[in-house]
Amino acid sequence: MGLAPRGVGGVVWDLGNVLIDWDPLAAIAAGVGEDEARRFLDAFDFRAWNHGPDSGGSWADAEAWLDAEHPQWSQHGRAYRPHFAASLLGEVPGSVELVRRLHGAGVPQWGLTNWSAELYPHAPATFDFLALLEDVVVSGVEGLAKPDPAIYERLVARTGHALSELVFVDDRTDNVEAAAACGMDALLFTDAETLRAALLERRLPV
């Protein structure tokens, strides 16, 4: 049995920029250089483009769309996938320690990440702490991505808990607001110490 307080079934973590420091600039720069990578990211809506594979689309289709619609950025966008590992910069300071403390105390934890099915295998191959999570719901595998309410509902079956019993942590306001609207206790991540204080308020053993 876990040691979460009564009424709390466990903690659900976003991965990118909550537990894993992710920056697409590093991957794109590996292919076209930092100046060109910055120019691309300043001018192009990378987040919206990346959301396609995150939602279950293929990277081949995303790249073909880029070739057709924004050929001036084809080389830049196509640099991302082969150099993806370079975008994973390490653990976010302090966050993974919270995961380890909760695991040590027997509190169940899960992941809920917007990540393409093709690129997600880099995560468990790089970060051993992910093995401390009971399961990770990967948007690209599910064909749904945050902040779509349907992906939060997937957590009910995957965790065995009502959404109201789960504490959710994410660094994006839209994802946090969507989780809260679904009934989760949703926390906006800014830094590990602020999060630790919020978890302590919920009597979680961190």
Image (spheres, rainbow, N blue to C red):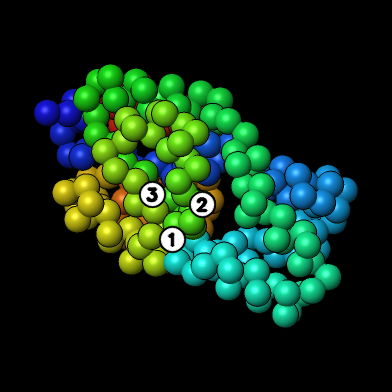
Mark 3: amino acid:
Leu
Q: Secondary structure at mark 3?
A: strand
> Dot 2 corresponds to which residue?
119
Q: Are marks 2 and 1 in contact (CB under 8 Å)?
A: yes
Question: Earlier along the polypeptide chain: callout 3 or callout 2?
Answer: 3
Mark 1 is surrounded, within 10 Å at the Cα level, by few (under 14), some (14 to 19) or many (20 or more) other residues, namely many
Residue 157: x and y in percent read 19, 55
- Residue 167 as seen in the image, left or right of residue 98: left
Question: Earlier along the polypeptide chain: callout 2 or callout 1?
Answer: 2
Q: Secondary structure at mark 1?
A: helix
- Residue 175 as seen in the image, left or right of residue 159: right
Label 2 and label 1: CA atoms lie apart by 9 Å
Question: Earlier along the polypeptide chain: callout 1 or callout 3?
Answer: 3
Q: Are marks 3 and 2 in contact (CB under 8 Å)?
A: no
Mark 2 is surrounded, within 10 Å at the Cα level, by few (under 14), some (14 to 19) or many (20 or more) other residues, namely some
> Dot 1 corresponds to which residue?
140
Residue 112 numbered mark, or none: 3
Residue 107 appears anywhere in the view: yes
- Please tell me whether mark 2 or mark 1 is closer to you in this view: 2
- Residue 195 as seen in the image, left or right of residue 165: right
- Please tell me whether mark 1 or mark 3 is closer to you in this view: 1
Q: Are marks 1 and 3 in contact (CB under 8 Å)?
A: no
Residue 129: x and y in percent read 40, 28
Residue 124 numbered mark, or none: none
